[in-house]
Image: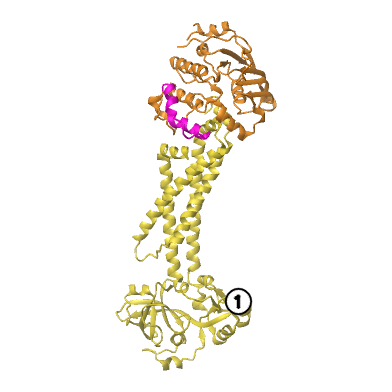
Amino acid sequence: MFLALRELRFARGRFALMGIVIALIAVLVVLLSGLSTGLVNDGVSGLKSMPATAFAFDEGTMTDNAFSRSLVDDEQLEYWAQAEGIESAEPMGVSIVNGTSDQGTQVDLTLFGVEPSGFLAPELSEGSGLGAPDGIVVSETARAAGLEVGSVVTLDRVGLDLTVVGFTAGQATFGHVDVAYLPIGTWRLIASNTATPGVPTEATVLAADYPYSSVVALRAAAGSSIDIEAGDDAAGTMTMLRTEAFNASPGYEAETLTLSMIQVFLYAICALVVGAFFTVWTIQRTHEIAVLRAVGASSGYLLRDGLAQAAMLLVGFTAIGVAAGVGLGAIMPEAMPFELEAAPVAFASLLTIALGLLGAAVAVLRIARVDPITALGGQR
Amino acid sequence: MTTHTVNTALTNTAPTSTPALEITDAVLELGDGDGRVRALDSVSLRVQPGEFVAVVGPSGSGKSSLLAIAGALGKPDSGSVRVHGTDLASLNRAAAARFRLRNIGFVFQSGNLIPALSAADQLRLVARLAGNRVVEPEALLAELGMAHRAGHRPGQLSGGERQRVGIARALVNNPSLLLVDEPTAALDRDRSQEVVAILAERAKRSAVAVVMVTHDRDVLGHCDRVLEMVDGQLSELSAAAMGSGTGQSSWNS
């Protein structure tokens, strides 16, 4: 590192230029990571927080939008409830509705119809839980739309009045729309198209004879696994593990694939740009390297020195870029789904450094091919 | 300035000491096919510690090849090369590098210093490569009259100063053999004399054997022996031939 450090200082202009490019790449990597996390949370945080192991969809449901497209009946539910390795199986209704709050603002909600006392019932940060047929528990993020405990939301067209009784702990959104949990009975009333305007009551809910739900949410018994294939064959369902089921939420795959592609390109650009820089740098130093090798420096020493130099440059400027990216993230507009989490940011920074080093390593390997004999004579 | 006694004998007269460099019947061919050239044609050379030998000759006559095989940078096709008793043929690439580091000093054209390093750091790097981290390069630089420039980078030094630093760098690990490649190529006449005088003085003082390849006949007066390389063959140059090129007394400088 003796030589590496002094060269960094000596050619600081050139290294700074390269460093700025690395830092800018790191800024982009951080912003994309934040955007990616934010979009994913916006898309499926409602699912992420659910303690379900898997979801059984009706057979043949298309994967995108499967949650709102699928319809399973009570027989399928019953089958899964009896299946081996299942601790519990509960119906879950999913539909996206438009409504108007009593303050007159328009709100879009993803209705999650669940058993009020089942395992899908939401964790609360405020208010009381599900129970009353007209009570809904909405995502923390719905406060932005002006909802409070006690607010009444009237569903468009149906005219059904629902009252906010509580808020979930943390963000619960699905398909970029705030989630409103409500009792499965009320969901069935809405889905059956028999609801009448006004406040739903126990009686109207019971009157709606609608033995369906969107999916069956499954929870595996501790320590046992579910035989998904056999269960699907018997029940006529298509079961996806919870994380697989993210793909069944609207736009999830399109968003994550797009962002992943941009990120992959950024990493490739990082490797190539750093590789190109160190190739030129190593070629510039060819004569100097020949002299050092003639004097007796081992290739190992020179390679280590070159790699250490690349590592210092990459680590230093990636750190600067990440810091700048995190700073920028703090001033992102509300409307942008942007969320920084330590793990993905750390992963993205390490990957930037690793791929930069890979590019540099390919370039620095040229050192091993420099013939010390070229130090003699006048050739430069 | 010092006046040197000149050893005119072809074979050196100190049979008890191990020669610093001993090349016997070295043959080296370069290139391939029709372009094949005999760069060294049965070259033999023996240099004793403290002896300053110059090799002159036209470009492409094999001078650089001679330095390469003497400096463990390449191996002859046949014949042997021994540096301070070690047969260089027995060394693989890595061992040759280690051997060069500790036993052979190189002085290149125009110094060939590392642009990023100050004069003192040039010496420190080479010392560190040999595992010596505590070296005080200032003392050696001072001996070569470069103490006041220890903190300067090559770009801030004149040609003569660079060459002095190059000599100091070559000496930092106390080699037994100093190989010098056209040290005066980029220097004016006065600086050339100074630099070669330094080499001559170091040879005597540190008992290091110096082999210098040069085009510059003006500086030969400092050398104990002058050899001429023509078409890969090495021969002793007569005193008359040496004097004729310069028109000055070769033996006093």
Magenta stretch, main secondary structure, is helix
Q: Nearer the viewer, residue A235 or A355?
A: A355
The answer to whether A269 appears left or right of B69 in the picture is left
Task: Give the chain letter at badge 1.
Answer: A
In the rendered image, residue B208, in percent from the top left (x then y), is placed at 54, 20
Residue B110 visible: no
Please give the residue where the numbered disc 1 appears in the rendered image. A228
The answer to whether A302 appears left or right of A319 in the picture is right
What is the quadrant of residue A159 in the picture?
A: bottom left
Q: Residue at x 49, y 76 (%)?
A: A51
The answer to whether residue B135 is magenta is yes
The answer to whether A124 appears left or right of B182 in the picture is left
In the rendered image, residue A327, in percent from the top left (x then y), is placed at 36, 57
Q: Residues within 10 Å of mark 1 (few under 14, many from 20)?
A: some
The answer to whether residue A117 is magenta is no
In the rendered image, residue A315, in percent from the top left (x then y), is placed at 45, 49
Q: Residue at x 42, y 65 (%)?
A: A38
Mark 1, secondary structure of its residue: helix
Q: Nearer the viewer, residue B57 or B111?
A: B111
| Vertical order, B232 against A201 (above or below) | above
What is the quadrant of residue A223 in the picture?
A: bottom right
Task: Specify the amino acid type for callout 1.
Answer: Ile
Outermost residue on the left side: it is A103
Instruction: Give the colouring mode of the picture.
Output: by chain
The answer to whether A291 appears left or right of A39 in the picture is right
Residue extent of the magenta highlight? B119-145
Identify the chain drawn in yellow.
A
* Chain B painted colour: orange
What is the quadrant of residue B224 in the picture?
A: top right
| Vertical order, A273 against B68 (above or below) | below
Quarter of the N terminus of chain B within the rendering: top left
